[in-house]
Image (cartoon, rainbow, N blue to C red):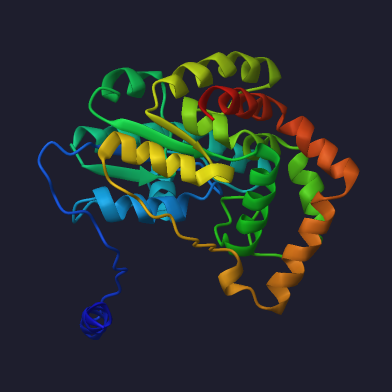
Amino acid sequence: MMKQNIKHLINHLGYDVKLHRVGKAQQNQAKFAFVHVPKSGGISIDLAMREQFAKPGEARFSREGAIEMSLTTFNKEITDLDSIAQFSDHHARQLNGLLAYHLTQNWQYISGHVSTNQHIIENFAQQYHFITVLREPVSRFISNYIYNKLTNSLPIMAPNNLNSDNLIAEVGHILAHRRGWQMANVMSMCITGRFAKDAADAQKIQSEFADNLAAYKVVGFLDNLDSFSKQIKQLSNKQINIGNHNTTDSFLDEKKQHVKSTLQNYFNEPNVKAQLEHLCRFDIENYQRAKEKYS
């Protein structure tokens, strides 16, 4: 009731705000940096972590704000899939700087769609517990694609919800383009700080992925969040309670439900699934090796 009254008062004054629990400040409390790999259960995990560890004012990084930041340093018009992919490469590099800046601010808890690299690991792994949760790459790709198609209204990112015609043709175009390659390799980008240029580079990045991940204090997996919670408790002596905050199904009208079911059915076709597995092959190997080491 108090929370609703506060929100009502703030709305009455002409502002909008989301209220979430944050942790109570304690001396010598462990500091965490949660690298949220998209569509890997991160919203639910972040809310649980934030309730225990974040201080007032330590907001989650805004995806839109981060994209806006990257646009200011991208000196090229974005008009087609080629320039969209070029911007995505640029944006991935900017996420390193965004994380590094906040790490220097000595926040108690940092989270968002950010990325680490070797430099960040070397300079901050002693001050921060880097943590992440990984998801099987093909299912992550499908979830990410459908979520973007339903919710993304930015023409500079693909796919987006500005047009729902020719859904299947659009998938084929993206999968055959570098943009599909980027979406298939998001997990390794989040850990290494960049998208691989090609297959040879992706193979090279695999050792970098393994080395960086070895410096993380907790590597969890979406299919076993109980283990992740237990490891956080061992590190901090605090229990996190991960709820279920599925942000895809909460807003689907009939048209969006049609888009979702059409794409799900298409992605489940054997030949398309095989294409996805090929695109994701390097992240699949990264995931399987991480599973063997950290499960």
Who's the residue at 26% across and 38% down the image? 236
* Quadrant position of residue 234: top left
Spot occupied by residue 37 in the image (x, y as percentages of width and height) = 50, 41
The residue drawn where x is 47% and y is 16% is 211
- Residue at the left extreme of this rendering: 27
**Residue at screen point 26% across, 76% down:** 15
Where residue 83 appears, x then y in whole percent? 61, 40
Residue located 47% across and 40% down the image: 227
Q: Nearer the viewer, residue 97 or 189?
A: 189
Q: Nearer the viewer, residue 108 or 172?
A: 108
Q: State which quarter of the image contains the N terminus.
A: bottom left
Is residue 233 visible in the rendered image? The answer is yes
Q: Is residue 59 visible?
A: no
Number of marks in picture: 0
Q: In the figure, residue 235 lies in which quadrant?
A: top left
Percent x, y of residue 223? 59, 44
Left or right of 223? Residue 70 is left
> Quadrant of the image for the C terminus?
top right
Picture coordinates of residue 153, whole percent (x, y): 56, 62
Tell which of 65 and 72 is nearer to you. 65
Q: Of 230 and 207, which appears nearest the observer?
A: 230
Depicted 53 relative to depicted 212: above or below:
below
Q: Is residue 290 above or below residue 57?
A: above
Residue 265's quadrant in the figure?
bottom right
